[in-house]
Image (cartoon, rainbow, N blue to C red):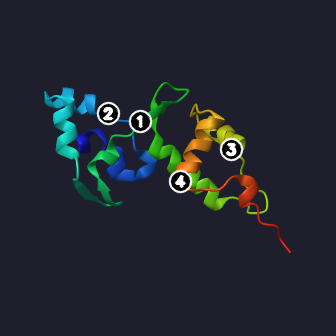
Amino acid sequence: SIVEEQQAFFDGGIAYLKPLNLKTVAARLGLHESTVSRAVQNKVVRTPHGLFELKFFFSSGLSTYEGEGASSERIKFIIRQWIEDEDKGAPLSDQGITDLLAAEGIRISRRTVMKYREEMGVLSSRLRKQIKM
């Protein structure tokens, strides 16, 4: 059921991970949410994109301007990519990332961007700035 729900992830990677909750899978399988939760605990799956715990696929999400969902893991992946590719002399601020995500159709607040950045262990733009000598 998880593979069917997350087929885009298996085909394309983390950037294609969709929001999914235990309730959806439980309803699809005719089980209680707690049964699904126990079933995925301490289990991993090997994918074309690496090894992942099954609970990784149960990701919260944010809505897009089109009304679809974007998983928090997908958004963190996008933020990480942008930060890795940024100009180190003028790093992206949390507001700049928020604006870029809005241009991609993802509705997110600056505070949520900050929370995701901190969860990933990424410093603020002020601390990431590298001065060229």
Asked if the residue at tag 1 contacts the one at tag 3, i.e. Cβ–Cβ closer than 8 Å, the answer is no
Tell which circle, 4 or 1, labels the residue nearer the N-terminal end. Answer: 1
Q: Which mark is residue 15?
A: none
**Mark 4: few/some/many CA within 10 Å (<14, 14-19, 20+):** few
Q: Marks 4/1: CA distance?
A: 16 Å
**Residue sitting at x 58%, y 31%:** 107
Q: Which residue bears the numbered disc 3? A: 94
Q: Amino acid at mark 3?
A: Asp
Q: Position of residue 119 (x, y in %)?
A: 52, 49
Q: Which residue bears the numbered disc 2? A: 21
Tell which circle, 1 or 2, labels the residue nearer the N-terminal end. Answer: 2
Q: Secondary structure at mark 1?
A: loop
Q: Secondary structure at mark 3?
A: helix
Q: Which residue bears the numbered disc 4? A: 120
Q: Amino acid at mark 4?
A: Met
Is 72 placed left or right of 113 in the picture? Answer: left
Q: Marks 1/2: CA distance?
A: 7 Å
**Mark 2: few/some/many CA within 10 Å (<14, 14-19, 20+):** some
Placement of 133 over or under 54, stated as above or below: below
Q: Amino acid at mark 2?
A: Asn
Q: Marks 3/2: CA distance?
A: 27 Å
**Residue sitting at x 33%, y 44%:** 57
Residue 5 position by quadrant:
top left
Q: Position of residue 123 (x, y in %)?
A: 65, 56
Q: Marks 3/1: CA distance?
A: 20 Å
Q: Marks 3/4: CA distance?
A: 14 Å
Q: Which mark is residue 60?
A: 1
Q: Amino acid at mark 1?
A: Ser
Q: Marks 2/4: CA distance?
A: 22 Å
Tell which circle, 3 or 1, labels the residue nearer the N-terminal end. Answer: 1
Q: Position of residue 82 (x, y in %)?
A: 62, 54
